[in-house]
Structures are given as C-alpha cells and as structure tokens.
Image (tube, rainbow, N blue to C red):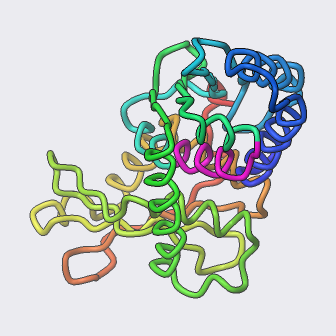
Amino acid sequence: MQSITQTSRSLAILLVVASLCFASCKSPEDRIQDFVESYNRGADKLSNTIVGSTSAYFISKDDVGLKFTTNNAVDSTDTDLYLNLLPDLIANLLSTTPAAQQLIHEGVTFNISFLDKNNSTVRKIRVDEQKLSELLAKSKEKQTANSKAGDLSHLSEDTKQMLTLLNANLPYEDVGTGIKILQVSVIHPQELTYTVEVPLDLVPIIKGEEAKEMLRNEIVNSENFRTVITTMEGINLIYVRYLYVGPSGEVVNEFKLTKEDLLPNKL
C-alpha cells in the first residue's frame, strides 16, 4: 500500500508525463486533450489506501476534469478527514507539475471531483490560478499546524504529513454534544493519539468500563477508523489511542485500538 506522500508523488509523476506531450504550437483544446490522454494512460498504475482510481477528461478549451474515487464508503463522520486531505493533495500536484501550471496560467480551470466507492460525491472543487494560490497558502499554514502535536523532528515525513492533515481543522467541536477533538499527536513510538475534551456535564457518562466499551464499538464501526488505521500501516504506526479529558485536563477515560479490533465485515 502507498502512503499519502507516495500518493502525491505517484500522481505528480502522471502529471509530469502528461506535460511531455505539450507543444507550444498546439491549440488549447489540443494541449488539454494531450494532457487527458497521457494522464489516463498511466492512471491505472495508481492504487493506495486513499485513491482507488483516477481519470482525466476534456470539458472545453477552458476546462479540464479530474476525477478521483476513494477506496472507502464515506459517511458524515469521515467527511472532514477527506475535506482536509484532498485539497492539499491537489494543491501539491498542480503546483509542481509544469503541464498543469501551463494550463492554469493560460486560464484553464481544473474541475476536480472526489467520489467514494459507492459513487457518492464527497467534494467538488474548481481550481483556477487564484484558487490554486489560496490552496497553496492554506497548505503552508497546515504545515505549521504540526507544532500542535509537539516536537516532530523524530518522525518520518509521511507521519508528519499525516499529522498535518489530521490537525488541519482542529480543535473541532461537535455542536450537538460539545465534545471537542483537541489534537492528534504521536507521543509514543508506533502510537497515534487522539486527545478529546469532554464537557463537564458529560464527564460522569464517559467514565467507567461500560462507557469505554460503547466508545470503542462506535469508533471501530466507523469508516474513519478504517481509513486511519490502514493508512497508519505504511508509516509504522500500530496503535490508535483515544484519550478523553475533562475541561481541566484530567483524564476521564482512555483506550487503544489496532487493526485487529476492526470487525470482520470491515476488513
């Protein structure tokens, strides 16, 4: 399985190859069509935990389409993960690929669609020159967000990128319950830690073994957990630790999960 970073590199290679087909004497329609054909010739080589398939298609002299289909069914609890991850992936690809840069500079817009394995739309985004600049600025901000997870100097680049993506929109508060995901960090080797703050009125409910079992079951049954745990395999992380704390920082409950905790029908 490829990591998120490897995914970016693989897609970038496809786009670089596509750039070789460009000729300055060709019309915009021809250059887009050459890009589409070259991209699609190599697209079947891409397979990883995030992207199951990808394809490019001609729309008009001003628009080109890119479609990405994930390997997973994406429910409402997983949407934020993909909304954080996918724009960064695209910003990196389009900004480092001469062919894409040339098209965007000439005024071509990339119409990008992300679908889950059931063909349900997760996200659509139109990227022109201005939008690409915005995405790149946000991507740089996310890189600095790693400071939330402490000293990352000992971590691999793949792990750092994963933490950047997971921490991008944190803290995140569930408006219905007041529960906040504060940060995702790697404090101990091979262990990814989610720190979750519980409001004072829910502290008694979250405490104890019965509550722990309910929390474990809810998380294990989520597609989000499956996505995270399979991605972790490629960067030497084995455990996911969920640390629940009260408003004052006191530990209310905690537990660890691994791939073995996935239900049989989730594997």
The residue that appears at 45% across and 78% down in the rendered structure is 148
**Is 66 on the left or on the right of 62, as rendered?**
right
Residue 256, horizontal then vertical, whole percent: 55, 62
Residue 4, horizontal then vertical, whole percent: 70, 50
Residue 35, picture quadrant: top right
Magenta part of the protein: which range? 85-98
Residue 187, horizontal then vertical, whole percent: 59, 80
Q: State whether residue 77 is above or below residue 184.
A: above
Considering every residue shown, the one lying at the far left of the view is: 201
Q: State whether residue 188 is above or below residue 29.
A: below
Q: Nearer the viewer, residue 103 or 23?
A: 23
Taken as a whole, is the magenta stretch helix, strand or loop?
Answer: helix
Residue 41, horizontal then vertical, whole percent: 88, 20
**What quarter of the picture does the N terminus occupy?**
top right
Residue 212, picture quadrant: bottom left
The residue that appears at 65% across and 62% down in the rendered structure is 239
Q: Nearer the viewer, residue 13 or 80?
A: 13
**Is 231 on the left or on the right of 113, as rendered?**
right
Q: Is residue 147 magenta?
A: no
**Is 81 on the left or on the right of 100, as rendered?**
left
